[in-house]
Amino acid sequence: MRRVAAVLLVCVVGLCPTALAQQLKIHDGVPAEIDRGARYVIYLHGRIIEDQGPRPTHPDWGVYEYRRILEALAADGATVVAEQRPSMTDMDRFAQHVADQVRSLLRTGVAAGRISVIGFSKGGGIAMRTSALLENPHINFVFLGSCGDGDFRGLDLRVWGRILSVYEASDEVGQSCAELFAKSGSTGTRSEVRINLGEQHGAFFRPHNAWLEPVRRWIREAQ
C-alpha cells in the first residue's frame, strides 16, 4: 500500500503516468540481473492479445487493459515478466518456455515462494501446464478465469504448487477450478475466490481490485 500511495503522490506533484510507468519493473523476459530478495511475477495474457495486439477490444467484454494490469501488479513491488505471444501460440510449447524461466530464477537463488505465475484464460491454460511440468509444491500460481467446459477442464494433468483460482460468477468461459483441484496426484496448497462484477470474462480485462487484491495477498503471503 505504501508503494501505491507513493505512486499517487508522484502524480500529484506533476509526473505524468507515462513517466511513472517507466519506474515500474516490467520486463518482456527474465531480467539479466536478478535480485534474490525480489518477488517475481510472470503474467500470461489471454488469447485475444495474440490475435489483436496489446490493447484489443472484444465486442462483449470491452477493452483488455493489458498494460494497466501489468502496472498494477508492478506497483505492489513485484518484478513483472510479461511476453506478448504470437498468434496461434502452442500452449504446451510455451509452457515449456515459462517453466524454463522459472527454473532460471530458481538457479540464481530466488526462493520458490517468491516466484508467481499468473495466467488469464488461455494464459491460465499455459500456467496449468507449467505447474504440471515444474512439479514444485512451493511455487505460486494464479489461474484467472481459466477453468471451464473447454480444453482446460479436460486436461489430463496434475497441477502442482501453491495455487489460487479466481473466477467471475457471470463468466460462462472461465469457471471454478474445483474439478481440476480434486484430481488425485495434485500437490500443494489450494484456494479459490469467486467475484461478482457482472462483466463476464471481461472482469479480468481490467485491473479491478475485486480480483487484484486476492492476487496481491496470495503473492505477499507466500513464504
Image: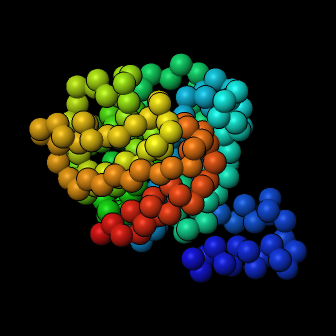
User: Horizontally, is 112 left or right of 79 in the view?
Assistant: left
Q: What's the residue at 42%, 26% (across, down)?
A: 91
Front residue (pair 152, 194): 194
Q: State the image coordinates of residue 172 (x, y, percent, origin top left).
A: 47, 30
In the depicted structure, whether residue 151 falls above or below residue 115 = above
Q: State the image coordinates of residue 217 (x, y, percent, origin top left).
A: 43, 66
In the depicted structure, whether residue 154 falls above or below residue 144 = above
Which quadrant holds residue 126? top left
Front residue (pair 177, 217): 177
Q: What's the residue at 55%, 68% (across, down)?
A: 76
Q: What's the residue at 32%, 34% (across, down)?
A: 129
Query: Farthest left residue?
Result: 184
User: Horizontally, is 108 left or right of 121 in the view?
Assistant: left
Which quadrant holds residue 189? bottom left
Labels in figure, total: 0
How is this picture coloured? rainbow
Image quadrant in which the C terminus is located: bottom left
Which quadrant holds residue 73? bottom right
Image quadrant in which the N terminus is located: bottom right
**Residue 31 visible in rendering:** no
**Residue 46 visible in rendering:** yes
User: Horizontally, is 220 left or right of 48 in the view?
Assistant: left
Q: State the image coordinates of residue 43 (x, y, percent, origin top left).
A: 50, 47
User: Horizontally, is 55 left or right of 73 in the view?
Assistant: right
Q: What's the residue at 36%, 24% (across, down)?
A: 149
Q: State the image coordinates of residue 219 (x, y, percent, origin top left).
A: 41, 63
